[in-house]
Amino acid sequence: MFVLGIDPGLSRCGYGCVEHGRKPRAVAAGVIRTDPRTARPVRLAEMQQEIRALIRDFAPQVVAIERVLFQHNVSTAMSVGMVSGIVMAEAATAGCDVIEYSPNEVKESVAGWGGADKDEVGRMVQTLLGLAQRLAPADAADAIAVALCHLARVPANPIRTTAGGRR
């Protein structure tokens, strides 16, 4: 089973694909970037194309997204929400299960407690995947952490149901 983890953002959107097995294995990790000087609709269209390509290339069964619960900057929160919506729509269209996790759920699953900082999460991602060095940038490590959170919270071979009731 492949899980695509997403740490949504309009300027930087982290992604990480993890394969489930006896030991989870990172298949890909990176960051999709858009230029803040470009108009928001164009940036959202670019993001949509990139997300669609990731789903096509990695064919995940599940797309796990970090949910934004609170943001001081309303404009940033709206942009993150828009990107999350694009990710959910593209994943559902492709027949993937879509699951959201709060930042605290991700931190608890990966680092053992919901108050972990980015450094702790990055170190635990490195340890859990047996990587020689930490993933960079942090957005990529955060996205892998979202995928690992899903694997920690879901049985190995659940019965899948997707949009439209297909199994």
Image: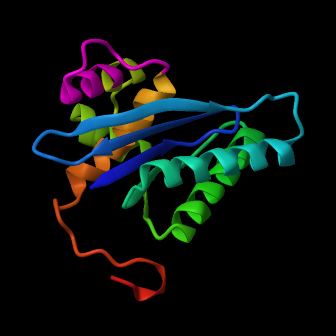
Query: Residue 128: percent from the left, percent from the top?
Result: 20, 29
Quarter residue 85 falls in: bottom right
Residue at the outermost front position: 57
Please give the range of residues in magenta: 122-137
Q: Which residue is located at x 32 percent, y 52 percent? A: 2
In reply to whether residue 136 is colored magenta, the answer given is yes
Color theme of the render: rainbow
Quarter residue 147 falls in: top left
Q: Nearer the viewer, residue 42 or 7?
A: 42
Whether residue 153 is visible, yes or no, is yes
Whether residue 114 is visible, yes or no, is no
Left or right of residue 108, residue 95 in this image: right
Query: Residue 39: percent from the left, percent from the top?
Result: 89, 39
37 is higher (above) or lower (below) than 103: above
Identify the image quadrant of the C terminus: bottom left
In reply to whether residue 132 is colored magenta, the answer given is yes
Query: Residue 75: percent from the left, percent from the top?
Result: 78, 41
Q: Which residue is located at x 19 percent, y 23 percent? A: 130
Query: Residue 110: percent from the left, percent from the top?
Result: 26, 36
Left or right of residue 32, residue 63 in this image: left
Q: Which residue is located at x 85 percent, y 48 percent? A: 41
Left or right of residue 44, residue 111 in this image: left
